[in-house]
Amino acid sequence: MIKQTIPGAQPKRKTIRETEAAHYIGMSVSFLRQGRMEGARQNRTAGPPYHKIGKSVRYRIDDLEAWLSEHRVVITPIAGDIHGRSSGQP
């Protein structure tokens, strides 16, 4: 099978730069930099995995998606009240 390409089209990127990664996950560039320099610390959310190629830092979109999924919080309300209070309480 011959793979056809569209002239001028770029292949879908698998990695993005630091500033793009920060925007993608909704965090600051300094959050990503501190995570790389300081590593995992107590009472601090560890940053997503990254690749270091020479001086360049790249983040895989798949890794960012996985990191976001790992930090997802789902709040389940207590039965009987949409505000998390059980019935009978003010």
Image: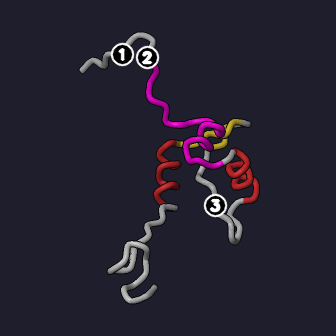
Q: Is residue 75 above or below residue 12?
A: below
- 90 left or right of 33 in image: left
- Identify residue type, mark 3: Ala
Please report contact status of discs 3 and 1: CB closer than 8 Å, yes or no: no
Tell me which corner region of the image, top left, top right, bottom left or bottom right, holds residue 20: top right
- Identify residue type, mark 1: Thr
- 30 left or right of 15 in image: right
The residue mark sitting in front, 3 or 1, is: 3
Q: Residue at x 50, y 54 (%)?
A: 68
Q: Residue at x 44, y 70 (%)?
A: 75
Tell me which corner region of the image, top left, top right, bottom left or bottom right, holds residue 11: top left
Report the residue marked by disc 2: 9
Report the residue marked by disc 1: 5
* Mark 3–mark 2 distance (CA, rounded to whole Å): 36 Å
Report the residue marked by disc 3: 46
Please report contact status of discs 1 and 2: CB closer than 8 Å, yes or no: yes
* Mark 1–mark 2 distance (CA, rounded to whole Å): 7 Å
Q: Is residue 26 above or below residue 82?
A: above
Residue 19 on the magenta segment: yes
The part of the chain drawn in magenta is: 9-27
Q: Is residue 77 above or below residue 68?
A: below
- Counting from the top left corner in percent of width and height, residue 23 is at 60, 41
Secondary-structure class at tag 3 = loop
- 24 left or right of 81 in image: right
Q: Residues within 10 Å of mark 2 (few under 14, many from 20)?
A: few
Q: Earlier in the sequence, mark 3 or mark 1?
A: 1
Q: Earlier in the sequence, mark 3 or mark 2?
A: 2
Q: Residue at x 52, y 55 (%)?
A: 67
- Counting from the top left corner in percent of width and height, residue 47 is at 63, 55
